[in-house]
Amino acid sequence: MRSLIAPSILSADFSKLGDEIQAVLAAGADVIHFDVMDNHYVPNLSFGPVVLQSLKKRFSTVEFDVHLMVTPVESLIDAFIDSGATYISIHPEATQHLHAAVQRIQDGGVRAGIVLNPGTPLGVLDSIINNIDLILVMSVNPGFGGQKFLPESLPKLTAAKSMIDRAERPIRLEVDGGINVENIGLARQAGADMFVAGSAIFESANYSTVISQMRALIDQKS
Ligand code: DX5
Ligand code: ZN
């Protein structure tokens, strides 16, 4: 699977959000990561489906990767399907009916992901791996951009990659949190093929330079 770079717009300048997205796409981004926070599941508040709806009007062909950090999650799944998400990922802790929530996403024609917090064991995937399109390994605790990458997420990525190989299905392995040019190559070696980066991109002076450096590191054969 081709490796994908997914800038998290949580770290963008919200006063010019559309232009920020235009800029990272021109700089080589593949997918836009859309972090939805509700001040309940996580102690922070970001943006909701109407924002995605507006962005899809301007960027109709762009893929949006929606990361739902909300509880309850069910009604927002429907709203994000209607708003044009390409991927919707949910935390197992945010629903009492994980299998049904995954099915609800896929019934809407959207690819479904499961997100593992640093404290969530891989075992939660055992009964659902044959039904999902993506596994997202959090390399920080969810809630804020700009946190430090947790190195213990590397062996977790390796273990998740083995599960994917055993499942013999095309499941993406995404990593999210503290990703930068220093650690993206390690995440790639551990098996990730989709890389979220917020502050490392949006707080840099030149988006193209960082994204090109990241691309070179993840395209390297290892
Ligand atoms: C954290 C979010 C991440 C975060 C990434 O809860 O899910 O997507 O915004 O930002 P950085 O790359 O700055 O850690
Ligand atoms: Zn995220």
Image (cartoon, rainbow, N blue to C red):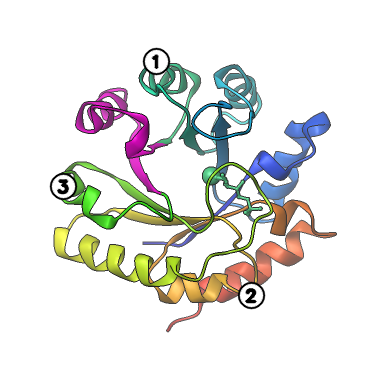
Q: Answer left or right for 155 relative to 127.
A: right
Q: Where is residue 192 in the image (x, y as percent from the top left)?
A: 41, 64
Callout 1 crowding tier (Cα within 10 Å): few <14, some 14–19, many ≥20: few
Give the residue displayed 35% in from the left and 31% down from the top: 110
Q: Quadrant of the C terminus?
A: bottom left
Residue 19 position (above or below residue 198): above
Secondary structure category for the residue under label 3: helix
Callout 3 crowding tier (Cα within 10 Å): few <14, some 14–19, many ≥20: few
Q: Do the residues labelled 3 and 1 touch (CB within 8 Å)?
A: no
Q: Residue 182 carries which label?
A: 2
The segment highlighted magenta reads: 89-116
Residue 162 placement: quadrant = bottom left
Give the residue displayed 57% in from the left and 37% down from the top: 34
Q: Residue 75 carries which label?
A: 1
Q: What residue type is labelled 2?
A: Glu
Query: Relative to the observer, which residue lies in front, 155 or 31?
Result: 155
Q: Which of marks 1 and 2 is nearer the N terminus?
A: 1
Give the residue displayed 56% in from the left and 70% down from the top: 184
Q: Are marks 1 and 2 in contact (CB under 8 Å)?
A: no
Q: What residue type is labelled 1?
A: Ser
Can you tell which of label 3 and label 1 is closer to the viewer? 1
Q: Which amino acid does label 3 sit on?
A: Asn
Q: Which of marks 3 and 1 is nearer the N terminus?
A: 1
Tag 3 residue = 130
